[in-house]
Image (spheres, rainbow, N blue to C red):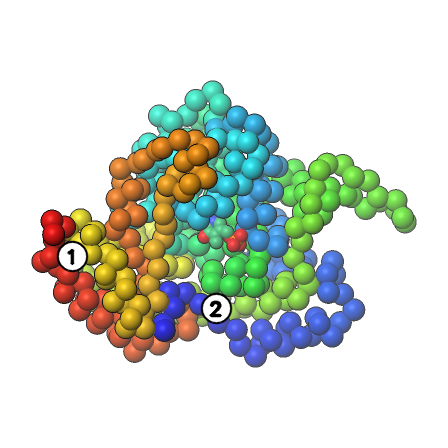
């Protein structure tokens, strides 16, 4: 099976991790700091605070931004549930804006959703394609809202040559095993704001600040959301390899783009000339006449050893959200869920693998082309 995404771990990564395992510090040593510095250097931001997952990183960012009970957060439903879960945990209310055909929040809908209760805007860079962050930032600034970007898919993506992570007030990345690079489990918040970074670090570690000798002081509520030293060493080592990963993903994606150009049965995600995508996912968007064949296409491709997946069921369609906030639907988002299939695209694939995937995607979808949805 060729999975839709997977990690790449080589001897240099293993050596970096085992070196830490043989050392005196498995946690709270110097590796986390070195890794955070490397992240800042790569992104071009002032500060980075690592976490044990992007989920805890999101909770930290929302909390530090002051998100609290009954605040409204404008976000997109086409994301992993954690994006909304972590502000619902703080008793804030999701206000979902519809997406565009590329799966990213439609920035034209944001302003009309703003009320006196709106606290933050949380866009997601779907599949690694950057959202229109400059336009969204203008809206956030005009209305005095915090802009928190869930860039879990988009480490290494750029807009106008600048990395995702240099635009929003806080940007979150995931380093889960199958994200652009990995620490096994892990997350990062990057920011240029010195007040935020101090609080993020406190939040990550019990809210406790060390003073002299034995003295320490708990200044705010905090947790243990720290990354271990060996995870940080893996992250540091992976970061050295990231540009190779991104190049490989771009190669595969560009090969698909060429094979699928002008296809009449499905569309692909268009990356604009001013953008670069990490290509965390390669989504294809089936035409409406294929919606009712999607399950068959999915199964066929799985049977042929192609690990397709669907990203994502709109968050509002999950039972928890229906029970909590009632039935809700957005036209493009619901349609996107009916249309989307993610096909394999990662750094462990060869171009031969990509050819096999493209041949079989085209063949399978063509088989269902004329069945229609009226049977
Ligand atoms: C993976 C992911 C998360 C959660 O990341 P973890 O590191 O697994 O906690 C959050 N948001 C999005 C968009 C993701 O893809």
Bin the neighbour count of mark 1 within 10 Å (Cα to Cα): few under 14, some 14-19, many 20 and up.
some
Alpha carbons under labels 2 and 1: distance apart: 31 Å
Q: Which residue is mark 2?
A: 7
Q: Earlier in the sequence, mark 2 or mark 1?
A: 2
Q: Is residue 349 left or right of residue 171?
A: left
Residue 358 in picture, x, y percent from top left: 24, 69
Bin the neighbour count of mark 2 within 10 Å (Cα to Cα): few under 14, some 14-19, many 20 and up.
some
Q: Quadrant of the N terminus?
A: bottom left
Identify whether 322 is placed above or below 310.
above
Residue 46 in picture, x, y percent from top left: 59, 48
Camera-side residue of 255 and 219: 219
Q: Is residue 288 left or right of residue 88?
A: left
Residue 92 in picture, x, y percent from top left: 52, 31
Identify whether 57 is placed above or below 276.
above
- Residue shown at 11% from the left, 52% from the top: 375
Q: Is residue 160 left or right of residue 198?
A: left
Secondary element under disc 1, as helix, strand or loop, is loop
Q: Which residue is mark 1?
A: 265
In the image, farthest residue toward the left: 370
């Amino acid at each position: 099976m060729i999975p839709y995404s997977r990690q790449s771990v080589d001897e240099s990564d293993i050596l970096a991790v085992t070196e830490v395992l043989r050392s005196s510090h498995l946690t709270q040593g110097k590796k986390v700091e070195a890794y955070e510095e490397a992240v800042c250097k790569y992104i071009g931001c002032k500060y980075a605070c690592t976490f044990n997952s992007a989920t805890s990183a999101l909770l930290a960012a929302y909390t530090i931004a002051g998100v609290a009970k009954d605040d409204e957060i404008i976000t997109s439903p086409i994301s992993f549930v954690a994006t909304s879960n972590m502000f619902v945990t703080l008793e804030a209310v999701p206000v979902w804006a519809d997406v565009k055909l590329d799966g990213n929040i439609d920035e034209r809908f944001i302003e009309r959703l703003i009320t006196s209760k709106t606290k933050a805007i949380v866009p997601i860079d779907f599949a690694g394609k950057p959202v229109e962050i400059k336009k969204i930032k203008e809206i956030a600034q005009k209305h005095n809202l915090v802009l928190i970007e869930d860039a879990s898919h988009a480490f290494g993506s750029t807009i106008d040559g600048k990395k995702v992570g240099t635009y929003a007030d806080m940007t979150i990345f995931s380093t889960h095993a199958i994200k652009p690079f990995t620490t096994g489990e892990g997350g990062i918040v990057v920011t240029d704001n010195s007040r935020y970074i101090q609080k993020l670090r406190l939040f990550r570690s019990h809210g406790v600040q060390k003073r002299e000798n034995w003295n320490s002081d708990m200044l705010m509520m905090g947790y243990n959301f720290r990354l271990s030293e060996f995870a940080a060493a893996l992250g540091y080592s992976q970061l050295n390899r990231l540009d190779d990963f991104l190049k490989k993903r771009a190669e595969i994606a560009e090969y698909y783009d060429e094979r699928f150009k002008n296809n009449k049965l499905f569309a692909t995600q268009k990356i604009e000339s001013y953008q670069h995508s990490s290509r965390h996912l390669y989504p294809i968007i089936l035409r409406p006449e294929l919606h009712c064949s999607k399950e068959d296409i999915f199964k066929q491709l799985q049977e042929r050893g192609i690990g397709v997946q669907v990203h994502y069921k709109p968050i509002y369609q999950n039972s928890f959200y229906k029970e909590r906030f009632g039935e809700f639907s957005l036209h493009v988002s619901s349609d996107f869920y009916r249309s989307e299939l993610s096909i394999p695209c990662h750094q462990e694939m060869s171009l031969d693998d990509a050819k096999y995937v493209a041949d079989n995607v085209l063949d399978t979808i063509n088989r269902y082309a004329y069945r229609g949805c009226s049977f």
